[in-house]
Amino acid sequence: MHLPGQKKRNESENSPLPVYRGLINRWRSLYEDQPSTRHVWNDGLGTYVLKEGAAVPEGVKTRAQIVAERNKFLASYRWNDGKSAWEPIAGKPRDVAAEPLDCGKTRAEIQKDCTAFLKTHRWDEASGTYVAIKK
């Protein structure tokens, strides 16, 4: 107990406890916004998914919305290294969503395949595709 006019034992002017309490409260508020409180890991998908009944915060896009926007953009534009800019693709846009997301090959196998392909094909600026080299 303390007498009137005396400070409590933990409330001295140099005590770090109020600072620690503030840091702990700040950490808790940050932690509550982390995916682990609103999401759960899905082994089948290999990613975090919203817990049942959890809503996406206002103004935050879902992963599906971001992927759809990216696929729409990639279907309509291609990167031009010469201009260092994105250019619209003429003709029918490609279907990026149908392309495989992962590959069973190793990096070395892919490089080997690319090297073999480039020995038999060249880039044609007019058609915008690779064409077989005529011998």
Image (cartoon, grey):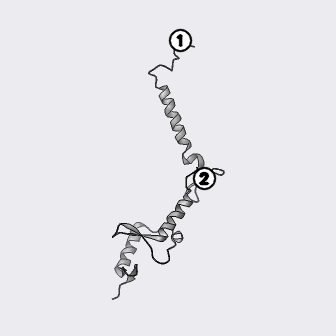
Q: Does 17 sit above or below residue 71?
A: above
Q: Residue at x 56, y 56 (%)?
A: 62
| Residue count near mark 1 (Cα–Cα under 10 Å), binned few <14, some 14–19, many ≥20 | few
Question: Regarding mark 2 in the picture, which secondary structure is present there?
Answer: strand
Q: Residue at x 51, y 70 (%)?
A: 96
Quarter occupied by the C terminus: bottom left
Question: Regarding mark 1 in the picture, which secondary structure is present there?
Answer: loop
In this rendering, would 109 be left or right of 40? left
Measured as percent of width and height from the top left, residue 64 is found at: 56, 60
Which residue is disc 2 drawn over? 50
Query: Which range is magenta?
Result: 49-56
Camera-nearest residue between 4 and 17: 4
Measured as percent of width and height from the top left, residue 34 is found at: 54, 46
Residue 31 falls in image quadrant: top right
Most distant residue in the right direction? 53
* Overall secondary structure of the magenta section: loop
Residue 124 falls in image quadrant: bottom left
- Mark 2 belongs to which amino acid? Leu
Quarter occupied by the N terminus: top right
Which residue is disc 1 drawn over? 5
Camera-nearest residue between 49 and 92: 92
Residue 101 visible? The answer is no
Q: Earlier in the sequence, mark 2 or mark 1?
A: 1
Camera-nearest residue between 39 and 73: 73
Cα–Cα gap, marks 2 and 1: 53 Å
